[in-house]
Image (cartoon, grey):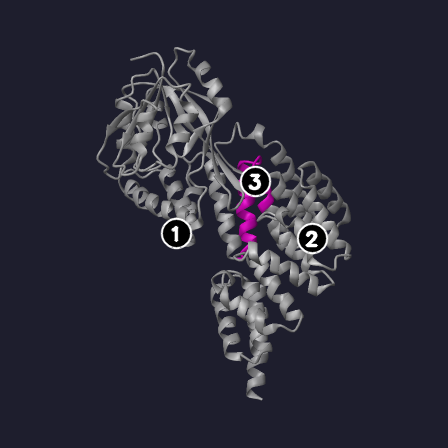
């Protein structure tokens, strides 16, 4: 066994990612061991260009088996294992060799940061990715494989490190994420039959959540929160998923209960406090909503420090929290909170967006050309705030022109579609509003308020049967949303009475 570091990898058709991965570690590892499971692209050519030791493995739906074959061919005293869609952080590349200056059997926790530009959030999770080589160390699990259980049995010491690995493999479309989740789910369910444990069940729950199999995910996480063996941070995450599922069903009391349980277990997660603030706002508990907003901001500012102790963390950007805080200030008409959010956003270099808000709010704008240069400051993080402010704008013609611009960039956003349709209707363009919502019904059908407006537009244009069909679907699909169901039933009763007359 050599004294250096072996990079251990398994790959298949990773030509798109492999070069950047190997380039990030080429100066710190002494050996590159790549096990290929059947590449047909230029993956192996890239591996050869880095003088990698290449081995072949017949894929058998078992990531651990392939990982263990790769381990068996590593000769270094230390193992770093990566996937092709991962990169070792530049600062970590400088530090990693210093961690080998010990004779102890050690496994180092590394922070893997997964990026998602679609929702402009990242997730961090800690895994042992760097450890002293041992011929008895083996990966377990058909998917989301782990080395930690094996190292625990070998009495390894585990140490938190500040090594960071950037993961870009989930920075893909929603459909791409679902394809990966479906592949993983099939392997996880097989694994759970033969090796039932909380970690695998947690991964099954996450996969079901991504696939929008919310009933199955809910059952998975309800089972997990009852477990005495699950790590408290993963239990907190399970409560967080349950809160999100409940909120999607408009069961706000249940959502509040679940996220409060998550916070009791782990109060340092900014996302938990942000979610609870949104729940309180929906329940018109305004003081509590502001209190949780402040806690979310504070947690986000301290997230780098708190992430050291969090095994898993949703990295909500401070900007996202501040945009929500600004929208909250508008919704509850709190000028002090508004000014505070403006000041914080200036500090985060969001001055262009703040200027846009102030221009729109002033009411002096009469032409879309006056604000067109600011539109690139609008993102998924603040689009809801913009549509809310436009909904209050006195100049409906300007608001309509602005919404047309937003529609070009955010045509699948329910807030944009809803406000665009409402503004068309306010300008006596109800038929255009109907056509817009019909053309995007796949988006509209998941938002009960958009559906309600759609039905009301049908009523205005004397298309009562179509309106009734939507009312019935709201009652059926959103039966937990009692306030909405009551409103729909009241309208239906009036409609039916008018038909009888």
Quarter holding the C terminus? bottom right
- Please indicate whether residue 311 sits to the left or right of residue 36 in the image: right
Residue extending furthest bottom? 501
Residue 191, percent from left and from top: 29, 40
- The mark closer to the camera, 2 or 1, is 2
Quarter holding the N terminus? top left
* One can see residue 140 in this view: no
Q: Residue at x 54, y 43 (%)?
A: 120
Residue extending furthest left? 58
Q: Which residues are magenta?
A: 250-275
- Measure the C-alpha gap from mark 1 to mark 3: 26 Å
- Measure the C-alpha gap from mark 3 to mark 2: 28 Å
Residue that carries the numbered disc 2 in the rendered image: 371
- Measure the C-alpha gap from mark 2 to mark 1: 46 Å
The numbered dot on residue 216 is 1
- The mark closer to the camera, 1 or 3, is 3
Residue that carries the numbered disc 3 in the rendered image: 316
Q: Are marks 2 and 1 in contact (CB under 8 Å)?
A: no
Residue 11, percent from left and from top: 31, 33
């Amino acid at each position: 066994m050599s004294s250096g570091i072996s990079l251990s990898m398994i790959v298949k058709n990773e030509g798109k990612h492999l070069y950047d991965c190997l380039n990030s570690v080429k100066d710190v590892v002494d050996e590159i061991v790549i096990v290929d499971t059947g590449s047909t692209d230029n993956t192996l050519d890239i591996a050869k260009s880095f003088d990698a030791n290449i081995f072949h493995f017949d894929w058998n739906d078992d990531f651990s088996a392939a990982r263990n074959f790769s381990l068996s061919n590593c000769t270094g005293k230390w193992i770093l294992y990566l996937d092709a869609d991962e990169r070792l952080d530049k600062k970590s590349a400088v530090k990693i060799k210093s961690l080998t200056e010990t004779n102890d059997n050690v496994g180092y926790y590394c922070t893997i940061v997964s990026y998602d530009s679609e929702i402009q959030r990242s997730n961090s999770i800690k895994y042992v990715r760097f450890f002293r080589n041992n011929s008895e160390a083996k990966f377990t699990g058909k998917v989301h494989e782990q080395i930690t259980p094996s190292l625990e049995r070998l009495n390894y010491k585990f140490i938190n490190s500040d090594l960071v690995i950037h993961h870009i493999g989930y920075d893909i479309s929603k459909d791409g994420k679902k394809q990966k989740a479906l592949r993983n789910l099939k392997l996880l369910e097989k694994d759970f039959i033969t090796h039932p444990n909380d970690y695998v069940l947690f991964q099954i729950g996450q996969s079901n959540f991504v696939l929008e199999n919310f009933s199955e995910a809910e059952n998975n996480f309800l089972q997990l929160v009852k477990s005495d063996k699950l790590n408290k941070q993963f239990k907190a995450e399970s409560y967080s998923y349950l809160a999100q599922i409940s909120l999607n069903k408009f069961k706000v009391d249940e959502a509040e209960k679940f996220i409060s349980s998550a916070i009791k277990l782990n109060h340092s997660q900014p996302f938990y406090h942000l979610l609870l603030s949104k729940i309180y706002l929906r329940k018109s508990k305004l003081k509590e909503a502001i209190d949780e907003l402040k806690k979310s901001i504070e947690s986000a500012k301290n997230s780098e420090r708190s992430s050291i102790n969090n095994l898993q963390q949703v990295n909500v950007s401070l900007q996202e929290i501040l945009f929500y805080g600004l929208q909250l200030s508008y919704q509850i008409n709190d000028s002090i909170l508004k000014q505070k959010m403006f000041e914080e956003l200036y500090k985060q270099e969001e001055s262009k967006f703040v200027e846009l808000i102030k221009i729109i709010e002033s009411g002096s704008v009469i032409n879309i050309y006056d604000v067109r240069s600011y539109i690139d400051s609008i993102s998924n993080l603040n689009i809801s705030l913009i549509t809310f402010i436009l909904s209050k704008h006195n100049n409906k013609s300007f608001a309509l022109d602005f919404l047309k611009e937003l529609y070009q960039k955010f045509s699948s956003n329910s807030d944009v579609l809803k406000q665009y349709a409402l503004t068309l209707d306010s300008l006596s363009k109800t038929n255009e509003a109907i056509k817009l919502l019909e053309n995007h019904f796949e988006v509209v059908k998941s938002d009960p308020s958009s559906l309600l407006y759609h039905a009301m537009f049908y009523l205005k244009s004397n298309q009562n049967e179509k309106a009734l069909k939507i009312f019935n679907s709201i009652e059926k699909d959103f039966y937990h949303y009692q306030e909405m169901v009551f409103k729909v039933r009241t309208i239906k009763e009036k409609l039916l009475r008018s038909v009888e007359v």
